[in-house]
Amino acid sequence: MEDTLFGILGLLLLALFMAPFVVAWWKIFKKAGYNKYLSFLMVVPLANLVMFFIFAFKKWPVQKELEQLRQQLLKTLPMEDQK
């Protein structure tokens, strides 16, 4: 009985400790244009390391969208304004 109580209490404390990190990663992934549910991978050992490096070195979806919008804008400008 006592071991179960400490096990449940330990899991509850772990969840309370990890929640702010999941929320922070949730916001970061959402702002970068990734699926916000990837934030839950950041609490999984080894998966968080892999996601961190993918996140650091891969072009973000929001960057791709910005480049496309810039290209569209350049196509609509007269030639003299593109310099």
Image: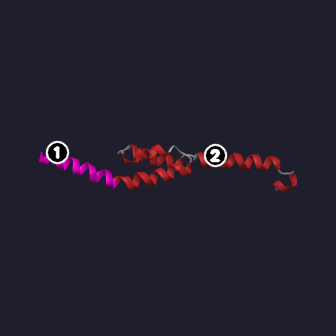
Asked whether, in this view, residue 70 is left or right of residue 22, the answer is right
Instruction: Give the position of the C terminus as an image quadrant.
Output: bottom right
The residue at the point 51 percent across, 43 percent down is 35
The residue at the point 39 percent across, 43 percent down is 47
Magenta segment includes 64:
no
The residue at the point 66 percent across, 49 percent down is 66
For the residue pair 26 and 1, the one nearer the viewer reads as 1
User: In terms of sequence position, does the residue under pointer 1 or pointer 2 come before the other?
Assistant: 1
Q: Position of residue 16 (x, y in %)?
A: 32, 54
**Pointer 2: residues within 10 angstroms few (<14), some, or many (20+)?**
few
The residue that label 2 is drawn on is 64
Distance in Å between CA atoms under marks 1 and 2:
50 Å
The residue that label 1 is drawn on is 4
What is the magenta range? 1-17
Q: Decide: marks 1, 2 in contact (CB < 8 A)?
A: no
- Dot 1 lies on which element? helix
Q: Is the magenta stretch mostly helix, strand or loop?
A: helix
Q: Position of residue 36 (x, y in %)?
A: 49, 46
Q: Residue 76 carries which label?
A: none
For the residue pair 24 and 8, the one nearer the viewer reads as 8
**Residue type at tag 1:** Thr
**Pointer 1: residues within 10 angstroms few (<14), some, or many (20+)?**
few
